[in-house]
Amino acid sequence: MAVVHERAPRLRLRITAAAERSLAAGHPWLFAESILEQNRPGRLGELAILYDRKDRFLAAGLFDPHSPIRFRVLQLGDPKLIDADWWRRRLQSALERREGLFDSQTTGFRWINGESDGWPALVLDRYDRTLVLKLYSGIWLPRIEEVVNLIQETLRPVRVVLRLSRNVQTGARQDYALENGIVLRGAAPVGPAPFYETGLCFEADVLQGQKTGFFLDQRENRRAIERLASGRTVLNAFSFSGGFSLYAARGGARQVTDLDISSHALTAAKRNFRLNRALPVMKSCVHIAIQADAFEWLGKNKRDRFGLIILDPPSFAKRQSERAGAIRAYQRLTSLAAQHLSQGGILLACSCSAHVSADEFFEAVGRGVRGARRRFELLQTTTHAPDHPATFPEARYLKAVYLRVN
């Protein structure tokens, strides 16, 4: 992918000492308030250069005049020519990090995980031969054709679907005629995109579904649930399309209950069960779907007990100001769920709230279980899957804890 050629002089930025130290230590973002001087107004997505206090090259990156994150690092430390070959090598590095992680039994995973793979604010997910490109910043909009051409040339997918975060959608529509969910290469899919994960068949709604169509980041926790499910009755709260439930069923669960407020999600879960009905173990597992608010159902239902409960709610803190309320919500949710665990039952509690630290989350879960007057044993904690590397604090959103009630 070639650099956009510009007649104006290269955009040059001088920044605060604190920001300089942060970037030199490897943080990939520069915030607007850290810019002391720039030689001219910058354009969306153009390549900018940072210089340190001694006028030495510090970093090259993409500029966004509309975002508090004004600059996102591409190259740090040593100046290099960012041309088509540079971009090709950068993509190849991301692909090589995934070598050996997956076999033919898993055709759904992440090829590029944003800043942690050197592609700031850009995610590329694979669903078999359908690829989904998701942008979290407008910096890529001026280069979208070059990005997609490189992906097409390297990976040869059947189609490439574009997904846009909400903060990008208006500008993409008005300035680039791009819509969330459009197909950039290939024919539009007929229905959800099928793929395999550890030999189980799933469908992803790549055009309109949450994230890029499926929660690929929970793969390792789903595999762990399969190993724990034998002979148990399972509750999958915030079940979405039933990923944890299918693994539990294949692991020998006697009964699996999907609990979600969305009828669309429960329908998708039923469809995923049907896709795997040829597996004999699936026929022996009773699958129940309940449409309800998880907090309300857990609070009002005083009867049902489960040997394994999965809590995988959406983010309770999408901004820092919501952090305290999110911690209280995790504690309350855990307390309600703990009352439904049978003796020796196992609880998996997950958080995808980047503004709540792992320690804060684990402490909230512990308080919740103790508040339900249950004693517990910590089995393990987990974080990101290997295809979702997280190399700086804001990228470390996913954490999970496994407890056994004694």
Image (spheres, grey):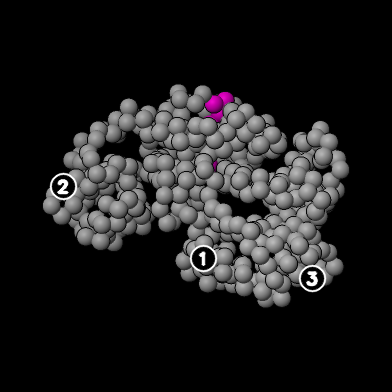
257 with respect to 36 (left or right) = right
What amino acid is at disc 1?
Answer: Asp
Q: Which residues are magenta?
A: 157-164
Magenta span contains residue 319: no
User: Which residue is tagged 1?
Assistant: 359
Q: Judge whether 277 appears above or below 315 on screen.
A: above
User: Which residue is tagged 2?
Assistant: 56
Relative depth, front residue between 405 and 199: 405
What amino acid is at disc 2?
Answer: Arg
What amino acid is at disc 3?
Answer: Lys
Does any portion of residue 133 appear in the rendered image? no
Nearest-to-viewer mark from 3 and 1: 1
Tags 3 and 1 in contact by the CB under 8 Å rule? no
Which numbered marker is on residue 187? Answer: none
Residue 284 location, x and y as percent? 86, 43
User: Which residue is tagged 3?
Assistant: 300
